[in-house]
Amino acid sequence: MEEVVEPKREQNLVRVGMETWTQSFGTSHKIRLVHILKNLHTSEVKIYSDASREFIELLDGESGGEVLREYVQQSPQLVELVEAWRLHREKPGMAYILSLFATVLGHPGGKSRQNAVCKKCLDGVARTILEDKEKTGDVYLELKSGEFRRQNAALDLLAAIVRRGGGLASEVAESFDFKMAILTQLAGIQKKRGGRDGRIQKKGANFGSTRQSLVGFAMSFLEVGNPRLLRWVLQQRELYSGVLRGIGEDDAETVVYVLSTLRDNVLVEESLLPPGLRSVLFGSATLENLSLISGNLDAGEAAELAHHVLVMVCTDPKNGLMPSSHLRGNEKRLLDLMKKLKATEVIHHKNLLLAIVSKRLSLCSAYMNEFPYNIEPRSSPSWFAAISLAADVISSAKSDSIFHSLLSHDLVSVDDEQVQVLLKCIVPHVCSRSVINRGLLHSDDLVKHGSLRLVSESLNLLRYVTEAINGMVSSVRLTSEFTGSTKGKVRMNGFPGLSCSTPTDASLAGQVHQADETRVKRWISLREYIQDEVRGAMPDPQVLLKLLSSASQKRQNYPQSRLKRHAQLCQPPQKKQKCDAIDNDDDIIIGGIDVEQAKDESEEQDQDLANDHATTLCEIWGLPKEDLELKDAEVVDSVFHSKLLDVLRLYLRVMPSSFDGSFDFFRVIPPNPLKLSKDEQHCLLSLLIEYSGQCEGRWDPERVPESMYKHLPPLIDIMLHSQVKSIRDEAYILVKAAFTSSGAFDQNFAEIDAWLVFLPGYEAKWSVGESLGVGLSNKLSHLVVPFLCDAISVVGNNLYKYQEHMRKFISKSGQFEGYSPAFSPLIVCVLQKCLRLLDLESGGMKLHEKSTISVYVCNTIYLILQSQVDAQLLLDLIGAILNERFDKFSSEEIQSRTYFAEWRPLINLLHILRVSPTNKVLVCS
């Protein structure tokens, strides 16, 4: 770099500079800049203040960067500007000179590393200002002047110096007096007369204020991002508390600037700031201001950013407010904020509340203990919003981390404070049993929906807790079994083959096992205690059963009422016809009221009411508001019915003794379950799976209720014809359980599937687009399914009779003594029933219907024959039954019946039996 010689007089410097500046630099800019520099040195305030503003405009223009670089190249130490500072020190208009320095030092073109020479020169100028006591004195003088323009200029200059880099920022931080009383005043707003006050001000509305410049000065330290500097400067509470406490009165641009700086430079791991220091920034007043901004619908980006920052501050333990296992946090400050949120009115407030609750169980309990809304059942928008919020809060408590502290202790007792906190979350005091009962029995359907949603979320939270405890119990037992099955081996003298098992090992293993059993018992005791406490606070099960009965009856009556309503709509009113007969062209005006107009207005009001009804329902259950079907009363009742079924399922899951076996839930299956909505079908089957003990979608023959086979027809109907695979799978589990309940398959559960394979439409469950049409499949299944279900019912009711029949046959044969049949007595019943059906020459059943049943029976029996390891006993039994009937026919009669479609499958089956049981023969048809 060439050595620059500083001229003695400004006039000579300007003249020399004009001759030496590069040709690329515009002549107009040269002339203008020389004129500005001359005017800066005059004694007239008006002239040098205008010159300062003109220089600033030149730097802020499109070619400002080029002007700055060219000027610094010719005058690296900004001698002209420094001289202007000296000439106007302590004189009116000094603020204009400081503003000019702030613009020069803060210009992006002078901070870029691409312009290293320019940056280095300006850094030197900035450092000279900090090191010159007279100049720093001038800055402090302007700060304490009490005039907002002078104060703003000083603050802008300091901020520009800080933003030049970490070194200069540290020097400012070391020399600046952060304890000045004036800082509190600078953070305030000094409005001119006629200024407007509002939550989000328009830009420029705070004319006469020093706040924006103070905010820029405070944020400049954070923008530098030096961790060591951040830690020190954020301890200057006078500066930052003033900035954040007044953020609620700032314009949107300032709010976005402050919050984005905090988000990107302070609330990040790279800042290395301790949680305690971060929490100091966000006191109660600051949190409240941010919540007001986030709740302002007109704040736009500022509201979104305020909400984002609030969520970060309030939910991340690293920011000092949310407690964790190793951080104390500040629950009181969080709870105070939660109670101030308008969570039923502002979506950001609601989301923030739920985010906080999801992180800390004690905060959920404390908030629900002081729930700020009245949930006494009533039909009003405020109640619907309050009950939905209460349900959402309880729902948000379901978090994996929320039970970590509870389940991490080995010995949790019922008196543990955390257990009581948990109970207050599941069943808050404000949601008492009597209140919920009144809500469920309310005359308004939407109030019923809201109350049921609350019950649903409480039960879901209880389910979450019990599953967590069950997982802990299983883990302890698994660990105990592993420890008990492993013997300790001790190597002796380095020989791996030598080991010993001493009495001490056995004693230690016994102690470990005993300790594990103690832990298991305590966990089980805790689970039962929680279930008992919740049971006492939940609605009376009889109330739910009453609702179920009413809802089921209402659903069954809907098709009739809909037809009736349709018929009424198709038939025009008689009065209207009579009036039309008088005069078809004239509108009828009665008492000054246009009948047609009144009708239109009434229909419009009904439509608005339906829209409001649907919107409320969506808000209660979190359903998509775009679903137009929710405006239909039948769909609304369908939603209630499905949710009620799901609540009853949860009752059975988490509180199995609630109903004490006093109610048979299979009674709620409608005659035609396929008329239910898909959600209703799923919830109904899930309830029945829970009731029948087939938990978590696994078939468990040991827990099947007695006489379940009596409800088999509708279950098979769903299994064959539902359009949803998951629903068909649930129905399949229940169908197998129903078969099992007859007791006929105890020797071979696998036979159940054989009875299902040839049901018309069954294969469609596994593949789409079968050659057998859906309509034909339905018709054929409606023939076969009643036949099969009736046979299973007969066997279930007369199981010992059919078992005795098989024992007598085995005894009579003499060659199967000691055999245990590997097939069910259903084969005997079905075969005999099929033969009796074919013998009936009349009775309302057509030939093709008999043929369908005959084909199904023979195909199924043949499949069971193929699955037998030793099929001789079954072959003889089937042969005995068929021979008993066919022996009554002559050979000519048997030959003639071969041509009858209904008899042909049985004759083919008999032929198979007589030829050889080992021959592979085609399926009967």
Image (cartoon, grey):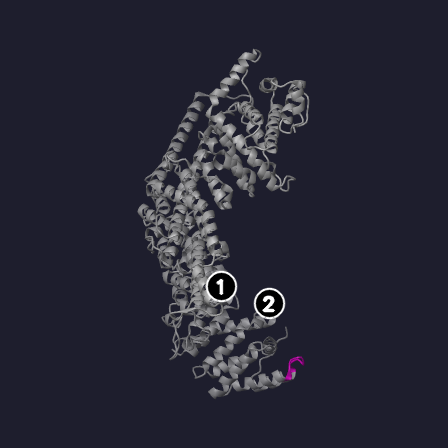
Q: Position of residue 788 (x, y in %)?
A: 54, 30
Q: Residue furthest top?
A: 814
Between 127 and 912, the one nearer to me in the picture: 912
Residue 676 in magenta stretch? no
Between 1 and 311, the one nearer to me in the picture: 311
Among the two numbered marks 1 and 2 on one chain, the one whose residue lies closer to the N terminus: 2
Q: Could you classify mark 1 by the number of other residues whose Cα lies within 10 Å: few (under 14), some (14-19), or many (20 or more)?
A: some
Q: Could you tell whether 6 is left or right of 918 in the image?
A: left
Residue 536 can be seen, yes or no: yes
Between 350 and 361, the one nearer to me in the picture: 350
Query: Badge 1 is on which residue?
Result: 260
Which mark, residue 191? none
Would you say the residues marked 1 and 2 are in contact, meaning their CB atoms lie under 8 Å apart?
no
The answer to whether 856 is drawn above or below residue 815 in the figure is: below
Query: Badge 2 is on which residue?
Result: 113
Which residues lie in the magenta part? 20-27
Q: In this figure, what is the number of numbered marks?
A: 2
The answer to which image quadrant residue 874 occupies is top right
Q: Residue furthest front?
A: 582
Q: Could you classify mark 2 by the number of other residues whose Cα lies within 10 Å: few (under 14), some (14-19), or many (20 or more)?
A: few
Indicate the secondary structure of the residue bearing disc 2: helix
Q: Position of residue 234 (x, y in %)?
A: 43, 62
Q: Position of residue 509 (x, y in %)?
A: 44, 26
Residue 22 in magenta stretch? yes
Indicate the secondary structure of the residue bearing disc 1: helix
Dominant secondary structure, magenta: loop
Amino acid type at image mark 1: Ser
Question: Which residue appears at 38% of the width and 41% of the height?
Answer: 545
Between 779 and 64, the one nearer to me in the picture: 779
Q: Position of residue 889 (x, y in %)?
A: 62, 19
Q: Quadrant of the C terminus?
A: top right
